[in-house]
Amino acid sequence: MNIEQIKAQAELDTAIDANHLEDESAKIPQIHNKYLCILMDEKLVLEALDSKLKILKRDKWLYYSGKMSEEQLKDRNWETFELSLLKTDLDRFISSDTDIITLENKCTLQREKVYYLENSVKLIANKIWNIRAALDWIKFTQGI
């Protein structure tokens, strides 16, 4: 599920129909569970991406330090790195590598999805208070 789909769904699920407050109240546990499940799945995706990033950084360190075997280079479809780098320069090359940057961008997007979902879960958990406030307002305006 991409971030735009999550946003669109959350916009619908967090809306309150003032004409059917009892129905809205009854739906809260199901909606809350729905977003908790999505959040859990997205957190697992984030963990997998973070693990891939760690492995890629290790592989790029081996690559740029000249310690990667020819067989490993072939498996990854990488060409031999011809320069001899100082240890202080390794981080600069690794952090500016396009494969690393691409995977870091995916991790950042996934973190933003998780953050959005965490806040959506909180918003849905608080939806009952919004419904209660609406009911209290109706009672007040009707003199009940």
Image (cartoon, rainbow, N blue to C red):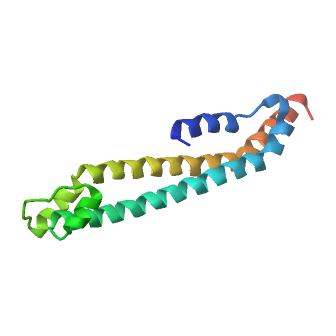
> Considering depth in this image, is 109 or 62 the residue closer to the camera?
62
> Considering depth in this image, is 67 or 96 the residue closer to the camera?
67
Is 135 drawn above or below residue 31 in the view shown?
above
Q: Quadrant of residue 1?
A: top right
Residue shown at the point (60%, 34%) measured from the top left: 8
Image quarter (top left, top right, bottom left or bottom right) of the C terminus: top right
Question: Where in the figure is residue 46, as x and y percent of width and height?
Answer: 48, 56
Query: Residue most toward the right?
Result: 144
The reply, left or right, for residue 83 in relation to residue 74 is left
Residue shown at the point (35%, 64%) measured from the top left: 54
Is 107 drawn above or below residue 84 in the view shown?
above
Tag count = 0
Question: Where in the figure is residue 49, as x and y percent of width and height?
Answer: 43, 57
Q: Quadrant of residue 53?
A: bottom left
Residue shown at the point (26%, 65%) measured from the top left: 72
Is 19 drawn above or below residue 38 in the view shown?
above
Question: Where in the figure is residue 51, as x and y percent of width and height?
Answer: 41, 64
The reply, left or right, for residue 43 in relation to residue 109 is right
Residue shown at the point (34%, 65%) measured from the top left: 55
